[in-house]
Image: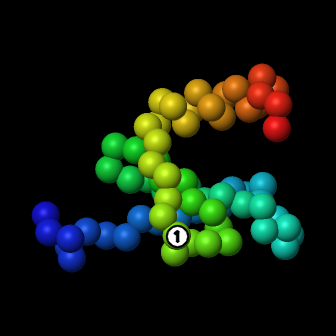
Amino acid sequence: MNESSKTAPQWRKSSYSGGDSGQCVELASLDGSVGIRDSKNPHTPHLAVGREALSGLLGRIKAGELDF
């Protein structure tokens, strides 16, 4: 598949994001990973992490194991 035939990732913001605080990230499904980017700067590079790593991180956040 050449570069021009690839479809652009569909970036999604959490339904919990609201207001104009600007403190949001967006996620997109990529080939074998999940893209993470700053919603305020969508044209800057994004991070790509494995699905299992992201799932583990979110689980630890929800369990209150991390001090933010």
Toward which corner of the image does residue 1 lie, by quadrant? bottom left
| Relative side of 41 to 66, left or right | left
- Dot 1 falls on a residue whose secondary structure is loop
| Relative side of 48 to 16, left or right | left
Q: In this view, does 51 lie above or below 18?
A: above
| Residue that carries the numbered disc 1 in the rendered image | 44
Q: Which residue is drawn at 44% across and 37% down?
A: 50
| Relative side of 31 to 2, left or right | right
The picture places residue 59, in percent across and down from the top left corner, at 67, 28
Q: Residue at x 54, y 54 (%)?
A: 36
Q: Nearer the viewer, residue 44 or 49?
A: 44
Q: Is residue 3 above or below residue 55?
A: below
Toward which corner of the image does residue 57 lie, by quadrant? top right
What amino acid is labelled 1 in the image? Thr
The picture places residue 10, in percent across and down from the top left corner, at 47, 65
Query: Looking at the rendering, in which quadrant would you find the C terminus?
Result: top right
